[in-house]
Image (cartoon, grey):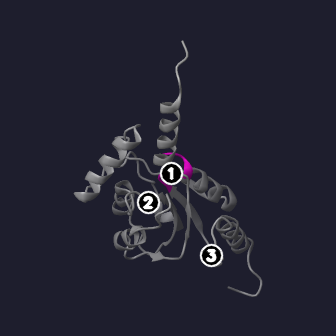
Amino acid sequence: MTDNPTRRELLVTSLLLSLTAARAAPATAALLPAGEVLVAYFSRSGHTRVVAGHISRALRADLFEIEPERPYPADYFATVEQAKQESDRDYEPPLKAETGDLARYDTVFLASPVWGMTAPPVIRSFLTAHDLSGKTIIPVITHGGYGLGNSLEVVASHAQRADLVDGFSMQAPQERQTIERVAAWLDGLKVVK
């Protein structure tokens, strides 16, 4: 980094500082290589989508949603079971679409939740389907309170020729806790006739 940071370097530092405000550890300023930026994300419940959208807007970066060809079930618990089975078998579900011309991007922000202490199977699919050699990957991870699990190791093993740099993580509201709280509340309702 030079003594006079570029507008993009200031934006990245500002973005990472604002995102990290939600966690206790101080932010480490990242250097964003010159060139085009892609924010690729997978989000089931919308929490990761919000974070990815913020990054895309702040950096004026392209945004790409990673989606499985066959969507995960709407029911949370059915999704948990399916993801567990996919992970146990090392299954990588087919993608609905690929990014197209990934070669034009120098940096990829990869935004994803943690599922069962690992990266969701569809993230493995994305990493397998795209050649990220020579690109800078900045992970952006949301989790339900149990931390990152082995999600960074998954990214590193699936994108071995990419430059994986420190990213950002935050605890996001857990869908399971929300469902359980609503169910408990509903169970407590008295029907008046």
For label 2, the SS is: loop
Q: Name the residue under label 3.
A: 25
> Mark 1 or mark 2, which has the lower sequence index?
2
Q: Name the residue under label 1.
A: 174
Point out the stretch of residues depicted in magenta: 41-47
| Count of marks, rendered view | 3
Q: Is residue 15 left or right of residue 95?
A: right
| Pointers 1 and 3 in contact (C-beta within 8 Å) | no
Residue depicted at 65% across the width and 55% down the height: 54
Could you tell me which quadrant the N terminus lies in? bottom right
Residue depicted at 45% across the width and 51% down the height: 66
Q: Position of residue 146 (x, y in %)?
A: 46, 64
Task: Indicate yes or no whether the magenta region holds residue 86.
Answer: no
Q: Quadrant of residue 57?
A: bottom right
Looking at the rendered structure, the kind of residue marked 1 is: Gln
Q: Quadrant of residue 27?
A: bottom right
Looking at the rendered structure, the kind of residue marked 2 is: Val
Crowding near the residue tagged with mark 3, few <14, some 14–19, many ≥20 C-alpha atoms within 10 Å: few
Task: Indicate yes or no whether the magenta region holds residue 46.
Answer: yes
> In this picture, is 169 found above or below 192?
below
Could you tell me which quadrant the C terminus lies in? top right
